[in-house]
Amino acid sequence: MKYRSRYVWLNGKLLPFEEATLHFLTPALHYGISVFEGIRCYDTEEGPAVFRLPEHIARLYRSARVLGFRELPFTEDELIAAVRRVVAANGFTECYIRPLIYLAEDGWNLSVDAGVPHIGVAVWEWTKYLGEEALGRGVRAQVSSYTRHHPNATMSKAKISGNYVNSVLAKTESVRLGFDEAILLDGQGYVAECTGENLFLVRGETLYTPPAAVVLEGITRDTIITLAGEFSMPVVEAPVSRDQLYIADEVFVCGTAAEVIALREIDFRTIGAGRTGPVARRFQQAYADVTRGRHALSRAWLDYLPVPAARPASASATGAH
Ligand SMILES: Cc1ncc(COP(=O)(O)O)c(C=O)c1O
């Protein structure tokens, strides 16, 4: 089975993987009333290290606030400890981490106030999200026929599970059409983001990215903006049109799962040289260094865990965002 591990942390307890199951009548399953995070743990020279863990947990709690949860059964610090515990218990050196706050009891009247939130954290071993070749070759994308959420519909600041139906519709359509990824426009027709990544374009010496108001405030996006500062590269947050993508020197997307991946073609138009360009390559390298403990910023952004005694046998998988 894919996404396997030895233990899942559920409501304060480490359960064997097989026992971490939910009842069919869990409201979160029926209405998408849950919020989640996607976090990664990297193998570094000093042992496994979780990248920007407090920032991810803080965003999880902000997502819960956007969805309207008032009382949560654990604090942010307790959940940070839970993440560390479940990664260590599974003995992984490199993995994907999936916390989820979900409406588990009642809530059948479509109000979060009528239900009780529960929290779980699962982990699984990881391979490349957009494929092994994507790093150097880049991937092919299409402007989706689906529009990104309006800020006054399901909003864009929260990783609410139900919101991801929009990403699933767009990604399914794009992959069936033969593309690798979908670019979603916002309600005004400007570029918003991809199904699980934020987007940057390069023109000359400047990086452009859609404003935070219409996209998820990606932690990788923030990392890229910080690294751009290190490179003395200006970053402009401004509306981006689809034809600005077509004429860009480079376009790349970034997210916890995808990391930094160039778009070599959009809507059958070759972007730049049709492969990962020098700017995207520079960010890929810096991102690899920062996540693997080889960068000056690594110390601030990595949460080091004890080195596991022995690696457990486990299936690896691709997936998630
Ligand atoms: C819609 C969307 N945009 C952007 C991102 C990138 O966010 P992050 O860099 O925090 O993973 C994600 C992934 O979480 C996402 O689902």
Image: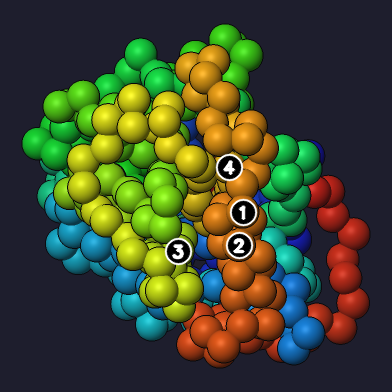
Q: How is the image coloured?
A: rainbow
Q: Are marks 3 and 1 in contact (CB under 8 Å)?
A: no
Cα separation, mark 2 vs mark 1, equals 6 Å
Q: Are marks 2 and 1 in contact (CB under 8 Å)?
A: yes
Cα separation, mark 4 vs mark 3, equals 14 Å
Name the image quarter holding residue 215.
Answer: top left
The label shown at residue 278 is 1
Q: Earlier in the sequence, mark 4 or mark 3?
A: 3
Q: Position of residue 294 (x, y in %)?
A: 68, 82
Q: Are marks 4 and 3 in contact (CB under 8 Å)?
A: no
Cα separation, mark 3 vs mark 1, equals 15 Å
- Viewer-proximal residue, 225 or 66? 225
Q: Residue at x 86, y 83 (%)?
A: 309
Locate the N terminus by quadrant: top right
Residue 36's place in the image compared with 107, above or below, is below
Cα separation, mark 3 vs mark 2, equals 11 Å
Circle 1 SS class: helix
In this orientation, does residue 69 appear? no
Q: Position of residue 270 (x, y in %)?
A: 57, 24
